[in-house]
Image (cartoon, helix red, strand yellow):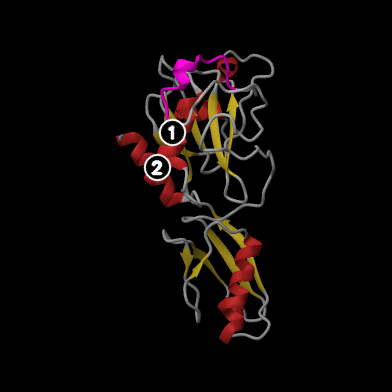
Amino acid sequence: MRAIKTGLCLAALMTLPGLAGCASHGADTAPVAAWGEPRFAAWQETDPAYRFYPGDSFEVIVHSAPELSRTVEIGPDGRVALPLISDLMVAGRTDREIGDTIARAYAQNVLVNPMVEVRRAGLGPQNIIVGGEVNAPGLVEMTGPIGALEAVMLAGGFQNTAARGDVVVLRRAPGGDMMMRTVNLHDALRARQGADNIQIRRHDIIFVPRSTVAEVNLFVEQYVMGIVPLDQAMSFAIADAITNN
């Protein structure tokens, strides 16, 4: 991992509103304050609990009323249908949070002190978005664990104009803020020791710029900011905008 190059001339940065000077040196895991809006949260390399999204399915086990137990799939609107209660919004939540949501719904007028357990049953499409200087930008479905380099290759590979050493990965933090870091895929292509080819997660956004960090801000401003949560439906909307722009 390395920080985006900061040796940019003033004239290049002044081509976008809000950019009044060259970026200062600093680690690429720190909040980006000197690059103009939008700002990014500090990168967190954590292993969070799995969150469910449309297309995923899970088993609902109602221990206090087994006849209500069943396997359900999250619909395109992020809701699930269960007997005796209204459809519930569950997208973007963990298994424990979904279990608590279902238990509260049953406790309102159906069951007394319901005991509900949720277990993951099946996964929907594991989509990511790849944009910028690649040959086939848009939505990419992961069929297994992949790194940033594999994600770019699934999007048709680099264009000749790509800045391969400063590829940007955008990811939502648990609180909803957008995190950003850069990876050096120039070294990864050459299998150099220490090359930073991080594992990509569902709903990540990979952006391959031409040269300047100003492009990253413009890309995020146009396609990403304000999309909370970044779920399956929003992924399609962003990917369509990138592909057809």
Residue 64's spot in the image, x, y percent?
67, 81
- Asked whether residue 12 is drawn in magenta, I would say yes
Question: Which residues fall within the magenta stretch?
Answer: 4-17
- Asked whether residue 60 is drawn in magenta, I would say no
- How many marks do you count on the picture? 2
Type of amino acid at the residue the image marks with label 2: Ile
Residue 244's spot in the image, x, y percent?
30, 36
**Sequence-wise, which precedes: disc 2 or disc 1?**
1
Tell me if label 2 and label 1 are in contact, CB under 8 Å: no
Q: Relative to 162, is 100 on the left or the right?
A: right
Determine the CA span between mark 2 and mark 1: 11 Å
- Tell me the quarter of the image containing the C terminus: top left
Q: Is residue 216 above or below residue 143?
A: above
Q: In the rendered image, which quarter is residue 166 located in? A: top right
- Residue at image position (38%, 24%) is 135
Type of amino acid at the residue the image marks with label 1: Phe
- Residue at image position (41%, 40%) is 223
Q: Relative to 238, is 88 on the left or the right?
A: right
**Residue 238: mark:** 2
